[in-house]
Image (spheres, rainbow, N blue to C red):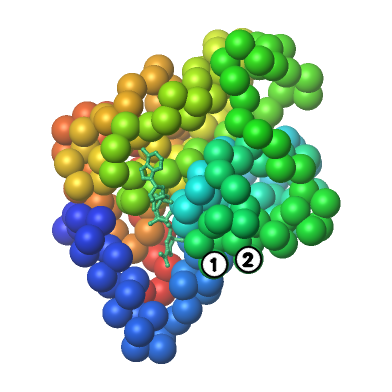
Amino acid sequence: MTDALTSAQMRNIEQTAIDGGKVTGLELMDRAGKAVVKAIFETWPDLLNAPRRAGILAGPGNNGGDGFVIANRLRDYGWDVEVFHYGDIDKMPPDAKVNALAFANAGGVVSPIIPFEGRDMRFADPPTDVWIDAFFGIGLTRPLPEEVRAAFLSISYERNWQSNKLVAVDILSGIDADTGERLTEFPLKPDMTVTFHAPKIGHLEGEGADWCGQLIVKNIGL
Ligand SMILES: NC(=O)C1=CN([C@@H]2O[C@H](COP(=O)(O)OP(=O)(O)OC[C@H]3O[C@@H](n4cnc5c(N)ncnc54)[C@H](O)[C@@H]3O)[C@@H](O)[C@H]2O)[C@@H](O)CC1
Ligand SMILES: [K+]
């Protein structure tokens, strides 16, 4: 496994490729989102044999942008997809906004995130087959907002009753990518984390090493 990177090193690699005209941020986001979907079907091929339901937890930034790429891609596979958005599409960074608008303009359902005492997720009907954590990635700088932690609790509640998968985009939200410190704790371990280009320190050190599930590193052409 290649050496683990800090978030700053990763951002520098991305920016150098973008500044060098090798790739655009939008292309990188597209590759990242599609890499997550590819990893899902490689890991759980039976999900390919029937349209399923996915819940995408999307945040305010580019990690959320990856979430919207994934949402669009799964809709292409005929899946029933609902995005629970912590953020405002209009305030998202440009690359993320392009993908969020593509989803919304194609009729994709964007809902507010689920308050814990809200929808009883225990017996959601139809059950959600795959939850995608695209709240925060390597840009996390402080503990999660309480409503984001509550949204995770709703899903941990449901997971006690329904078998579903949780996939973390780039890193489980709440984990500091540079240290592996869990800035916010909730009882939800991902089945899989899909990260891009190289592992980050937060995947291998501290508690982060225990909160990845299966760690998949996908090349996004950097
Ligand atoms: N060109 C790029 O920048 C690419 C970025 N990618 C994705 O973008 C992610 C990084 O995106 P961002 O830098 O936008 O950061 P995030 O999407 O991780 O976080 C979004 C924003 O939330 C704010 N924030 C941080 N901690 C918070 C907290 N606790 N509560 C509320 N708000 C908080 C910060 O302003 C941060 O910019 C990567 O993890 C990866 O998933 C990939 O698509 C590859 C290409
Ligand atoms: K994430």
Q: How crowded is mark 2: few (under 14 residues within 10 Å), some or many (20 or more)?
A: some
Report the side of 30 relative to 8 (left or right): right
- Quarter of the picture containing the N terminus is bottom left
Name of the residue lying farthest toward the bottom: 21
Contact? badges 1 and 2 (CB < 8 Å):
yes
At 26% from the left and 70% from the top, the residue drawn is 12
Q: Is mark 1 on a helix, strand or loop?
A: helix
Q: Is mark 2 on a helix, strand or loop?
A: helix
Q: What residue type is labelled 2?
A: Val
Q: Which amino acid does label 1 sit on?
A: Pro
Task: Name the residue beneath numbered marker 1.
Answer: 94
- Quarter of the picture containing the C terminus is bottom left
Q: Nearer the viewer, residue 52 or 88?
A: 88
* Vertical placement of residue 3 versus 159, above or below: below
> Where is residue 11 drawn, in percent x and y?
30, 65
At 21% from the left and 33% from the top, the residue drawn is 181
Task: Name the residue beneath numbered marker 2.
Answer: 98
Name of the residue lying farthest toward the right: 107
At 44% from the left and 24% from the top, the residue drawn is 146
Report the side of 29 relative to 74 (left or right): left
* Vertical placement of residue 78 versus 166, above or below: below
* Vertical placement of residue 207 versus 122, above or below: below
> Where is residue 163 drawn, in percent x and y?
60, 20
Label 1 to label 2: alpha-carbon separation: 6 Å
Report the side of 147 relative to 143 (left or right): right
Place residue 48 in its image quadrant: top right
